[in-house]
Image (tube, rainbow, N blue to C red):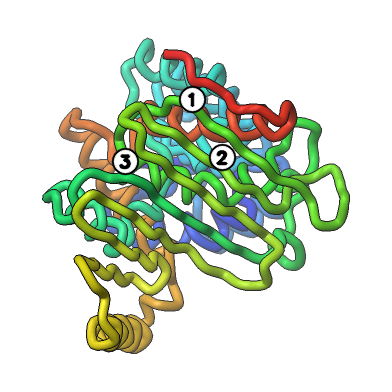
Amino acid sequence: MRVGIIGVGSQAKNVHLPTLNSMEEVEIVGIADINEERVKDISKQYEIPNAYTDYRDLLNNDNIDLVLICTPSYLHKKMVVESASAGKHVLVEKPMATTVKDADEMINAAKENGIKLCVVQNYRFFPSVKDTKARIKKGRIGEIISMHAYMLDFPPLGAGYSEWRIEGKDNAGVIEDIGPHLIDIVLHLNDSKIEQIYATGGCIGNLDLIDHAQIMIEFEDKSLATLDLSWMTGAKEIALYIQGTGGLLRCDVRSNHVQEIHQYNTPLDDLSSMIRKMRGIVRDVMTGDYFVGPKKFHKEIIRNFIVSIENNTKSPVTGEEGRKTAVVIESALKSIRNREPVFIQR
């Protein structure tokens, strides 16, 4: 598959370029970025034949089959629509969009031009999330009653600082940055339709910015989900606690560990769970997988997307799934501003 990349900032440089370069079935044909020096350096490093400072020139390259968009999210809609119009399949970084209107335009453009659209939601490919999904599907904990999920990260400053993460009047801050990962996991595990959303959030430093937030979702089947997001905790964690009518699931995403609980959870149960967790961590440390983290699963998404293009099958993460995340982001931001719940229109 011949690939072009639009936007070669930190995400493309640290994740996508090394991943694509390691895949035999992929040829990186061209890259585009407004930073001319960066484009020259990366094209030289990876021996990429075509380097552009205008992404439209990349889209006019007939040798490119698939475009990977790694630009700030507010640019996604325009670039996805133009890529689709140029007949290119599109893999777009998360969040696909932060408004439902933008998401719909992207989905429609893909359908009208007969191209495949896929969103980079790599956290759902963690073995712990797959295991949790399988247990729920098998009815191991009955019907879902509630989900308590949290994702904590450090402030988006320092070496990897990108202004778009924290600036702009429509910026959703932490909800737009790390939020899409947690939102996608929750919606992937509970596929009931969303009834209403209430959110609250703010900034510890009293800036015009959301650096911590809680999003509460009520689903059509009356199950609930609470998502706790923060840049300010000084820790890096992502986990879920899922309550069902027949048991509980604790999913430690980062450590790839799932604990299933029925009736009383004894100290022996906790000890057994801890031993299994430590064995898994030690194994991943020895193989190096523990330090790669979510980056490991970009290759799985890309490979599965290529297969879906070749076989005309469903994308691993569809535009419609990306739209659901946009619904939550847009509604959460509206709820915070208006201090009231948002009811989702069908």
Pointer 3 residue: 190
Residue 124 visible to the viewer: yes
Question: Of 334 and 88, which appears nearest the observer?
Answer: 334
Amino acid type of the residue that numbered disc 3 sits on in the rendered structure: Asn
| Number of numbered markers | 3
Percent x, y of residue 54: 66, 32
Question: Of 191 and 325, which appears nearest the observer?
Answer: 191
Q: Residue at x 49, y 60 (%)?
A: 15
Q: Is 205 on the left or on the right of 105, as rendered?
A: right
Check the picture and name the quadrant holding the C terminus.
top left
Pointer 1 residue: 83
Q: Residue at x 23, y 32 (%)?
A: 314
Circle nearer the viewer, 1 or 3: 3
Which image quadrant is residue 116 in? top left
Label located before the other in sequence (2 or 3): 2
Mark 2 Cα within 10 Å, few/some/many (few <14, many 20+)? many
Percent x, y of residue 113: 37, 14
Q: Between marks 1 and 2, how big is the CA–CA gap? A: 10 Å
Disc 1, SS: helix
